[in-house]
Amino acid sequence: MAGSGSSEVRTPIFSGENYEFWIIRMTTIFKSHGLWKLVEKGISISDSKKKVEGCSEEEVDEKTAAVYMQDAKALGIIQTAVSDQIFL
């Protein structure tokens, strides 16, 4: 099967027009990748450093790193989904 296993996300490009359609598509993309809550709520440094009951410091660090990776993935999706004129 061509393209199977690819992690590339095909996003619609926002160029300043049809925002209503673009945001619906982007919301669906984020939800399908399990990133919508992160996009909607964001992360705070204090939340990421909290001790998780029953977890070692190493496990907490791994969970924190995973959250930051998800945040970076969401940011990358957003950045690829806007035209160069909108990007900045």
Image (spheres, rainbow, N blue to C red):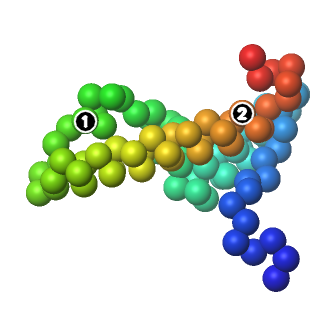
On screen, residue 18 versus residue 42, left or right, reads: right
Residue 71, image x, y percentages: 51, 40
Residue type at mark 2: give it.
Gln
The residue that appears at 52% across and 55% down in the rendered structure is: 34
Instruction: Kindly identify which residue carries mark 2.
Output: 79
- Between residues 12 and 66, which one lies in front from this camera angle? 66
On screen, residue 26 versus residue 53, left or right, reads: right
Quadrant in which the C terminus is drawn: top right
Instruction: Kindly identify which residue carries mark 1.
Output: 49
User: Around disc 2, counting alpha carbons within 10 Å, would you say few (fewer than 14), some (14 to 19), or many (20 or more)?
Assistant: some
Residue 48, image x, y percentages: 30, 37
The secondary element bearing badge 1 is classed as loop
Residue 87, image x, y percentages: 77, 23
Against 7, residue 66 (above or below) is above
The residue that appears at 84% across and 38% down in the rendered structure is: 13
Quadrant in which the N terminus is drawn: bottom right
Residue type at mark 1: give it.
Lys
Q: Quadrant of residue 73?
A: top right
The secondary element bearing badge 2 is classed as helix
The residue that appears at 33% across and 28% down in the rendered structure is: 45
